[in-house]
Amino acid sequence: EVQLLESGGGLVQPGGSLRLSCAASGFNFGAYAMSWVRQAPGKGLEWVSSIGGSGANTYYYADSVKGRFIIPRDHSTNTLYLQMNSLRAEDTAIYYCVKDREWLPRGYFDSWGQGTLVTVSS
Amino acid sequence: QSVLTQPPSASGTPGQRVTISCSGSSSNIGSNYVYWYQQLPGTAPKLLIYRNNQRPSGVPDRFSASKSGTSASLAISGLRSEDEADYYCAAWDDSLNSLFGGGTKLTVL
């Protein structure tokens, strides 16, 4: 069974940094692209970033986070990360770790974690 | 404002058939697969439809979807109270972004 367990959310001041983690299990982690999708309170889903599977060397970012967020993954520990810098109030959201069904990111999100809440406020 | 356009709300009575539309453009729906996600209240989204019209195992055949040109639609027949949820369409865009619709809140009256 696929399991995606996010951690690292919390309260951070504007301009601050936070690193989210997603521990993946139950599947061949390196064979699939992974993504982060967020949902602001009471709002819809917003794609944040995607990274290809092992060896793909592909990284995609939404314009709203480009230059501020980085999406590395560690195949030795089956962990996906989201390094978030220069955080803004509008980054406040639940952040979902999502498994793609394919090796390259194509938005085919077949498994979702339960999410971790990030609040950016002074 | 989302690039993929959905109606903000839809409703129906138990047993009815409802449809939810999703409109995009040639760079997303027009040239890539469409996906639909269901988000029950207080839970994470779940894949409902993949590759335009395919149901993952475990999704009832009451749920169906189609795509034509730059638009897509989700149909739910035999509406049940447990179908009350938010529904999102999604598609990859040729600009190397994944796009979601704004979501449709389905109310079962």
Image: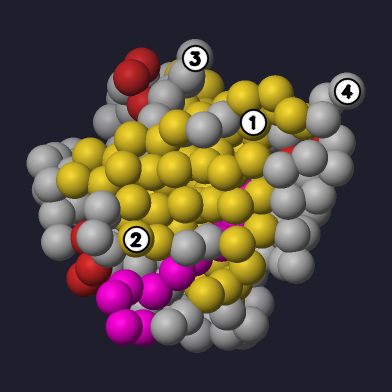
Query: Which is closer to the viewer, label 3 or label 4?
Result: 4
Query: Which is closer to the viewer, label 4 or label 1?
Result: 4
Tell me which label, 1 or 2, sits earlier in the chain.
2
Q: CA distance from mark 4 to mark 2?
A: 32 Å
Disc number placed over residue A6 in the picture, else none: none
User: Could you tell me if residue B53 is visible in this image?
Assistant: no
Report which residue position mark 2 lands on: A74
Q: Kindly identify the amino acid type of the residue bearing the numbered disc 3.
A: Leu
Report which residue position mark 3 lands on: B109
Report which residue position mark 1 lands on: A118
The crowding category of the residue bearing disc 2, from other C-alpha atoms within 10 Å (few below 14, some 14 to 19, many at least 20), is few
The answer to whether dots 4 and 1 both sit on one chain is: yes
How far across and how far down the image is residue A37, in percent? 53, 49
Question: Against A28, is A45 above or below?
Answer: above
Front residue of this view, candidates B43 and B56: B43
Judge left or right: residue A95 versus residue A2: right
How far across and how far down the image is residue A84, in percent? 66, 50
Report which residue position mark 4 lands on: A122
In this picture the colour scheme is secondary structure
Judge left or right: residue B67 versus residue B69: left
> Which range of residues does the magenta coloring cover?
A46-56
Count of picture labels: 4
Q: Kindly identify the amino acid type of the residue bearing the numbered disc 1.
A: Val
